[in-house]
Amino acid sequence: MSSTDPARTLDHPEGTASPAALTEELAARLARIALGHVEQEYPHKPGHVMATPEDARTPAALHPVFHGSYDWHSCVHGYWMLARVLRRFPGMEPAAAIRALFDRRLTPEKVAGECATLSCPGMRGFERPYGWGWLLKLSAELSHHADQPWGAALAPMAAIFVGRFRDFLPVATYPVRVGTHPNTAFGLRLAADHAEAAGDEDFLTLLRDTATRWYGGDRAAPAWGEPSGDDFLSSTLIEAECMHRLLPGSAFRAWFARFLPDLEASRPATLFAPATVTDRSDGKIAHLDGLNLSRAWCWRSVAAALLPGDPRRTVMEAAAARHLAAGLPHVAGHYMGEHWLASFAVLALDE
């Protein structure tokens, strides 16, 4: 399944560079992509354990809000991306369609249906921690639309996932360091946005203490396993971004100097070379376009946390630009990437 609408492609004329920031025109194009799939029920990849025959229901019956975009978590972060670009460019052409979508889907009744599914047996680990983090990041973004009822409608789901983080983190002895959905640094990073937006200092402290317990002693990250064949996260760089988000600036900079001590010399070299994507119709291989975009986000974000004049910033910003140029043109084109990559483009351009 591929896009043929020229308005939804993100190719850039030969010889021109990818944009370095989110513009209204690009935001509108990304929004149109997401609006085309967040309510598209099929194809659908379920992510729940079926405990009884009654659990074998259609995606929309199980998930009255987040049943589109191929899988639950992609639908959630599609909504996040739409909320983000609506806040940034409230007058853009697709804004009315985004507001209508949120009015239609982000209602107390539909959210109650989502919560009912989450209460079913076998759902304890549903979407842990990737979907948990994205739902909370969506909640944080909706808090910026304070004149709308959407954030209040979603609040019961946010409370469920905050509770699941509170239950899970104290018993999680070890982090998960893969470059896919189970990565724990990514989940902590996104959840921190909700904790801050909600003014939940206890939750923020739990996230910070967990990150310090899991990652605080890491030194000289080799990154030798990157990239694997279906990564969409750099386990090295997302750990750095997680620590950047949760530690005070001076504490983070001291930790980062130990974590990647040879960065000024562009080592480990594997972190500086964009991934090669050979088949965008293969959902796992297509993950690598997301890796390029998420690396661009991490490089840019962590570089900005360093002090002005730090020579590492130039190296990191150049790496971000290479990865962004490699990933951004492929946000649209085939549904295996199209159902999720626009969110990662907004992370890279606007976080």
Image (cartoon, rainbow, N blue to C red):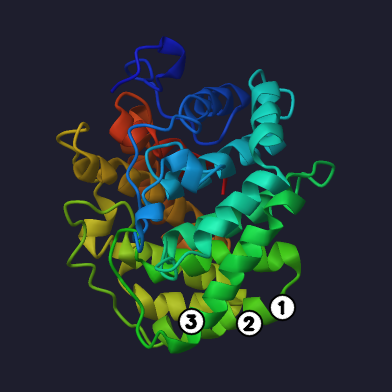
- Residue on which disc 3 sits: 169
How far from the left and from the top, in percent, is residue 253? 51, 75
Asked whether disc 3 touches disc 1, contact meaning CB atoms under 8 Å apart, the reply is no
Disc 2 secondary structure class: helix
Residue at 53% across, 74% down:
165
How far from the left and from the top, in percent, is residue 310? 49, 64
- Residue on which disc 1 sits: 201
Foreground disc of the pair 3, 2: 3
Please, what is the three-letter code of the amino acid marked with disc 3?
Leu
Extreme-right residue of the structure:
147
Please, what is the three-letter code of the amino acid marked with disc 1?
Glu
Any part of residue 203 in sight: yes
| Residue 324 occupies quadrant | top left
Asked whether disc 1 touches disc 2, contact meaning CB atoms under 8 Å apart, the reply is yes
Residue at 67% across, 42% down:
106
How far from the left and from the top, in percent, is residue 65? 57, 42
Q: Earlier in the sequence, mark 3 or mark 2?
A: 3
Which image quarter holds the N terminus?
top left
- 233 to the left or right of 34: left
- Residue on which disc 2 sits: 205
